[in-house]
Image (spheres, rainbow, N blue to C red):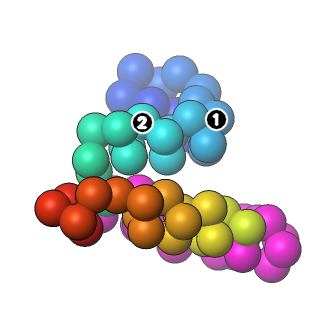
Amino acid sequence: MGDDQGQTVDGNDYIDDLLIQEKYDQATAFIHSQLKRLTTIDYNLLVSIYIEYLENLSPVIR
């Protein structure tokens, strides 16, 4: 995956950056885009981690 400057970026780092910047819609879209790229196990793990992150957000943000 590439960033705005064309640099290669790790998917996990990309998601982390989106979450830090509170760009939840973009993070969700990125995760959905990985459905056919990852194995079922890896995709389910990614979704589980993301859901856990969202559940731990403060109620105001949620």
User: Of marks 1 and 2, which one's residue comes earlier in the chain?
Assistant: 1
Residue pointed to by mark 1 = 10
Residue lying farthest left? Answer: 60
Q: Is residue 33 visible?
A: no
Disc 1 from disc 2: Cα separation: 11 Å
SS at badge 1: loop
Q: Is residue 12 left or right of residue 60?
A: right
Question: Which amino acid type is shown beneath numbered disc 1?
Answer: Asp
- The label shown at residue 17 is 2
Q: Position of residue 54 (x, y in %)?
A: 41, 64
Q: How many marks?
A: 2
Q: Is residue 25 left or right of residue 7?
A: left
Q: Position of residue 56 (x, y in %)?
A: 43, 60
Q: Is residue 41 magenta?
A: yes
Q: Could you tell me which quadrant the C terminus lies in?
A: bottom left
- Provide the residue span drawn in magenta: 25-44
- The label shown at residue 54 is none
Label 1 or label 2, whichever lies nearer to me, is 2
Q: Main secondary structure of the magenta part?
A: helix
Location of residue 20 with respect to 57 vertically, above or below: above
Q: Is residue 37 magenta?
A: yes
Question: Which amino acid type is shown beneath numbered disc 2?
Answer: Asp
Residue displayed at 49% across by 40% down = 16
10 Å crowding of disc 2: few (<14), some (14-19), many (20+): few
